[in-house]
Image (cartoon, rainbow, N blue to C red):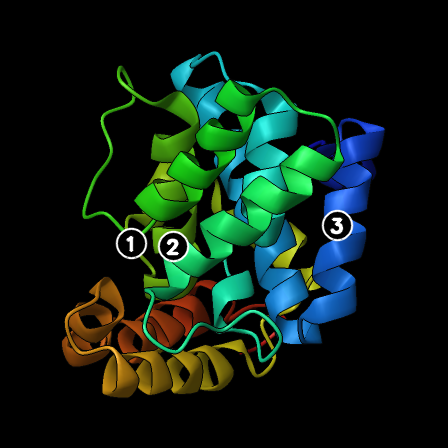
Amino acid sequence: MTLDLDELLAPPTPTAAAALETLQRWSSPALVAHGLRSWAWARLRADALSLPYDAELLFVAAMLHDLGVTPSFDAHEVAFESAGGAAAWAFAAGAGWSSERRERVREVIERHMWLSVDPDQDAEGHLLEVATSLDVSGVAPELWDGDVLRAVTARHPRQGFTAEFAGCIHAQATRKPTTAAARLDASQRIVSGGEVWAGILDGPSGAGD
């Protein structure tokens, strides 16, 4: 297997790099690693599907999609994906994106908590949804190459992610019981996803959870 991790994980534009800097400034190391892994899974899935997508838009959405669970951006009543989408809209405005493009990044982030997103209707929304479902809940890992999953995760380990994110989502569900976070919390998919990932990483290149 030949895999250029630096090329795979690199921000595609200066604005994308600024989104990564924003994530690093306001999120925990575990959430930073989650954002970068999500970008990798999304990009790899797009390649597997030969699905055209806007790389800058997808990268920015992947970096900022969970800002709504962080202390500085958590909203008391608004669903965390909506809070994250609003933060991303503001970021995009500062980056000089058009009003339509600002709405797109907000939309993609909000849709990552949908049960599914039609790739024919929203390529970036679909890619972020399947990527985060893999990284959080261990959904359909067979759609990716196992060696690649292990290599990317060795670069950006899952250490502590499952417990930290489960705690974030439980807090969201407790305060916002009508949101998608409550559905995710009740499903216990985060914990089971951690178990799936432990199995994926159980090998000489495993990074642990």
Q: Would residue 131 be found to the left or right of residue 207 on screen?
A: left
**Amino acid residing under circle 2:** Ser
Q: Which residue is mark 2?
A: 82
Q: Nearer the viewer, mark 3 or mark 1?
A: 3
Tag 2, which secondary structure? Answer: helix
Q: Nearer the viewer, mark 2 or mark 1?
A: 2
Residue positioned 69% across, 62% down in the render: 156
**Amino acid residing under circle 1:** Val
Q: Would residue 78 be found to the left or right of residue 128 on screen?
A: left
Task: From the top left corner, tell me how far across and down residue 144 is, in percent.
Answer: 43, 39
Residue positioned 55% across, 63% down in the render: 67
Task: From the top left corner, tell me how far across and down residue 188 is, in percent.
Answer: 21, 79
Q: Nearer the viewer, mark 3 or mark 2?
A: 2
Q: Would residue 1 be found to the left or right of residue 95 on screen?
A: left
Residue positioned 23% across, 47% down in the render: 114
Q: Which residue is mark 1?
A: 139
Task: From the top left corner, tell me how far across and down residue 10 is, in percent.
Answer: 78, 37
Q: Which residue is more in the foreground, 110 or 3?
A: 110
Circle 3 Cα neighbour tier, 10 Å, few/some/many (<14 / 14–19 / ≥20): many
